[in-house]
Image (cartoon, rainbow, N blue to C red):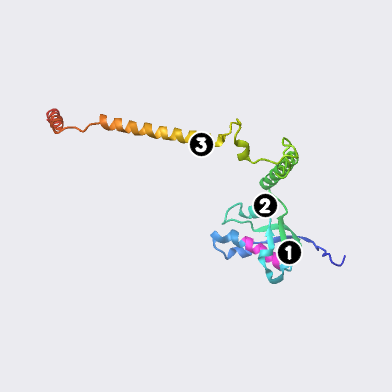
């Protein structure tokens, strides 16, 4: 098809030397320099336009391999596998050490288990449309609102909703009256001390602490 674009994938393997570039860098910047050296090497050999380093994507296992011994002791050479598509250059480590192999296998196992669980999960039922008719109500009769259903259940000519509101208001008023009476009782029971009582208490305090 003339309209479709063909993806030209290029795959290569390189052994990238890092020792020479790391000699002129201070110790606390060596691993950062190693990462930058790999990107510059691939930008030159994979013919990336404008040598844009943002188009080079390192694999997480390669990144962990470079940082395994910290910022001061990166490896002095790396063997990588490079894949170039229309947008990016993706870089992977060829020979994974045993620790990274174990980690990769464990992550792949977890992903496989997660996919199995997703397949087993039942599909959630979609909520029914409110526009559908209520089966309890016949099709000929108009639907009543919640307020209309709530009103006049006993059919005694009075609105049940109004009765309940009045009952609640009466209960609140009774509680308020009861609280006021209790406050009045407390005021009468707690009388202030007279001056003679205060003098007696002071004299007793002096005698005990003399």
Q: Nearer the viewer, residue 116 or 56?
A: 116
Q: Secondary structure at mark 3?
A: helix
Location of residue 135 in the rendering, given as x and y in whole percent from the top left corner: 74, 36
Q: Is residue 196 above or below residue 51?
A: above
In the picture, the quarter occupied by the N terminus is: bottom right
Location of residue 190 in the rendering, given as x and y in whole percent from the top left corner: 25, 31
Looking at marks 3 and 1 on the same chain, the residue that comes earlier in the sequence is marked by: 1
Segment tinted magenta in the rendering: 34-43
Q: Secondary structure at mark 2?
A: helix
Question: Mark number for residue 165?
Answer: 3
Per the image, the residue denoted by label 1 is: 87
Looking at marks 2 and 3 on the same chain, the residue that comes earlier in the sequence is marked by: 2
Callouts 1 and 2 close, C-beta under 8 Å: no
Q: In this image, 57 relative to 192: left or right?
A: right
| Magenta-drawn stretch, dominant element (helix, strand or loop) | helix
Q: In this image, 33 relative to 2: left or right?
A: left
C-alpha gap between disc 1 and disc 2: 21 Å
Q: In this image, 26 relative to 37: left or right?
A: left
The residue drawn where x is 57% and y is 64% is 25
Image quadrant in which you'd find residue 199: top left
Label 1 vs label 2, nearer the camera: 1
The residue drawn where x is 70% and y is 67% is 43
């Amino acid at each position: 098809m003339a309209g479709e674009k063909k993806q030209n994938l290029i795959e290569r393997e390189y052994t990238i030397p890092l020792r020479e570039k790391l000699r002129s860098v201070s110790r606390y910047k060596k691993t950062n320099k190693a990462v930058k050296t790999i990107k510059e090497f691939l930008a030159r050999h994979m013919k990336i336009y404008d040598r844009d380093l943002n188009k080079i994507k390192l694999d997480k296992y390669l990144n962990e391999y470079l940082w395994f011994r910290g910022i001061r002791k990166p490896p002095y050479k790396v063997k990588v596998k490079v894949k170039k598509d229309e947008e990016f250059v993706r870089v992977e480590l060829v020979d994974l050490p045993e620790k990274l192999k174990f980690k990769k296998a464990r992550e792949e196992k977890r992903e496989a288990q997660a996919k199995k669980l997703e397949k087993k999960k039942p599909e959630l039922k979609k909520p029914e449309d409110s526009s559908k008719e209520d089966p309890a109500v016949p099709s000929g009769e108009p639907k009543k609102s919640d307020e209309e259903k709530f009103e006049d259940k006993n059919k005694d000519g009075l609105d049940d909703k109004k009765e309940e509101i009045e009952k609640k208001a009466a209960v609140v008023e009774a509680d308020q009256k009861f609280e006021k009476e209790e406050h009045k009782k407390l005021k009468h029971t707690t009388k202030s001390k007279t001056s003679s009582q205060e003098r007696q208490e002071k004299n007793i305090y002096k005698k005990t602490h003399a």
